[in-house]
């Protein structure tokens, strides 16, 4: 459990870094779309290296997968394109605040209904209150920064 928490903490740390770095690249070259394209080239290259190191045989099972599972790629593209465009105008903190708020709501719904094979965890009053407290905490950090 600790290992998983640390990995996700590192991923969480990376989200604002990704936003700031790619937003700056997009501003420097004058195109958020081109910056996102470069980001995906680097990401695909890194992912390919990891996949080749862990065994590419899983690719042989792609054809039998439901089409909707591939929509995740569109969601990643939407996130990268939107954060690259929005962050320079709205601020990285503000952009990530709304991303976090969306993540809290979406994760709670996925868990509540057990969507896409996720472990089902009902949205109790206590859990909803915790999400509200988390959202309030993120909002307070943004208000304090002004």
Image (tube, grey):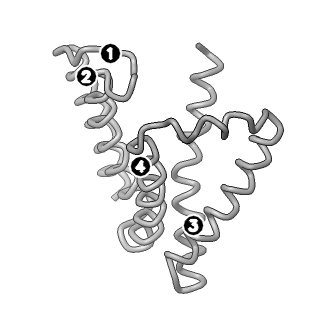
Alpha carbon separation for disc pair 2 and 4: 19 Å
Check if mark 1's residue and mark 4's residue have beta carbons within 8 Å: no
Q: Residue at x 38, y 74 (%)?
A: 89
Mark 1, secondary structure of its residue: loop
State left or right for residue 22 relative to residue 66: right
Alpha carbon separation for disc pair 1 and 2: 6 Å
Alpha carbon separation for disc pair 1 and 3: 35 Å
- Report the residue marked by disc 4: 71
- Report the residue marked by disc 3: 22
Of pointers 2 and 3, the one earlier in the residue sequence? 3
Q: Residue at x 70, y 61 (%)?
A: 42
Check if mark 2's residue and mark 4's residue have beta carbons within 8 Å: no
Q: Residue at x 31, y 14 (%)?
A: 121
Alpha carbon separation for disc pair 1 and 4: 21 Å
Q: Which mark is residue 113?
A: 2
Check if mark 1's residue and mark 2's residue have beta carbons within 8 Å: yes
Residue 23 position within the rendered picture, expressed as x and y whole percent measured from the top left: 52, 69
Mark 2, secondary structure of its residue: helix
Mark 4, secondary structure of its residue: helix
- Report the residue marked by disc 1: 120
Alpha carbon separation for disc pair 4 and 3: 22 Å
């Amino acid at each position: 459990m600790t290992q998983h928490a640390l990995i996700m903490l590192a991923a969480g740390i990376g989200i604002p870094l990704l936003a700031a770095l790619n937003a700056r690249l997009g501003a420097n070259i004058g195109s958020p779309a081109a910056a996102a394209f470069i980001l995906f080239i680097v990401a695909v290259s890194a992912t390919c290296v990891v996949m080749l190191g862990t065994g590419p045989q899983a690719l042989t099972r792609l054809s039998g997968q439901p089409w909707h599972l591939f929509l995740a790629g569109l969601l990643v593209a939407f996130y990268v394109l939107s954060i690259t465009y929005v962050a320079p105008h709205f601020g990285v903190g503000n952009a990530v605040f709304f991303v976090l708020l969306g993540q809290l709501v979406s994760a709670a719904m996925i868990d509540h209904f057990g969507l896409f094979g996720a472990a089902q965890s009902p949205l109790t009053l206590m859990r909803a209150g915790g999400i509200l407290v988390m959202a309030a905490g993120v909002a307070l950090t943004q208000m304090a920064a002004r």
